[in-house]
Image (tube, grey):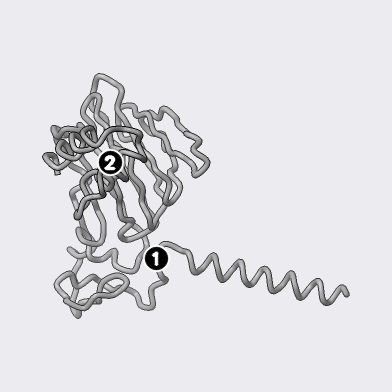
Amino acid sequence: MVVGKLSVVVVMVLVIATISNSVSADPDMLQDVCVADLNNAVKMNGFACKANFSASDFFFAGLAMQQPANNTLGAIVTQAFVEQVPGLNTLGVSMARIDFAPGGLNQPHEHPRSSEVLFVLFGELDAGFITTANVLVTKTIKQGELFIFPRGLVHFQINNGKVPAAAIAGFGSQDPGREDIATSLFASTPPVPDNVLSKAFQISNQEVDAIKSKLAGES
């Protein structure tokens, strides 16, 4: 009986380990480097490796520069994903910078392929995520502090201060993906039917059309 129970435990451990490996954000690499060939027409889980690479494929200066957050939401994201840094291909990491004007909002969104670590460069942000039980987890974070957003959960940051703010985000994927909730629902192509949105949000079709019109004008 002891042997039987032990075998069950061993099998369970192996199953858990297999599942854990299978749900990692990016597959393990099989060579030292696989610099993305962004011009290759072959579609795969990631990018094909290009034959020749240089140090510039592993370099990106874009996160050092503050960007003017003069759009409607008052926040702008500078990505350092595989499309910007081809050397990230197969490495399972990436970064981004978010610049906020006073009152700026990095709107509610989610990353389907990665959790996120957010580190405040300067200023102060109110950051939060929502669990699948509809619990809001929120915290005010200042310069030098960080906050974690679990993979796949809707989250946001807002600068409620009177001065600009900026943060660096780290991801466990070369391309974590991003789905903006409002844009996905009200500015998709083809559009989500009005009756679906009006019933879901308990608003009129006219209100749905008004929101769609505003978001379409900003996209």
Q: Which mark is residue 26?
A: 1
| The residue positioned farthest toward the right in the image shown | 1
Q: Quadrant of residue 42?
A: bottom left
Mark 2: which secondary structure?
helix
Which residue is labeled 2 in the image?
182
Q: Quadrant of residue 6?
A: bottom right
> Is residue 118 left or right of 204 when viewed as pictured?
right
Q: Amino acid at mark 1?
A: Asp
Q: Residues within 10 Å of mark 2 (few under 14, many from 20)?
A: some
**Residue 137 screen position, x and y as percent:** 48, 34
Q: Amino acid at mark 2?
A: Ala
Q: Residues within 10 Å of mark 1 (few under 14, many from 20)?
A: many
Residue occupying image coordinates x 20% and y 65% = 57
Question: In the rendered image of this protein, does residue 219 appear above or below residue 136?
Answer: below
Residue occupying image coordinates x 39% and y 65% = 26
Mark 1: which secondary structure?
loop
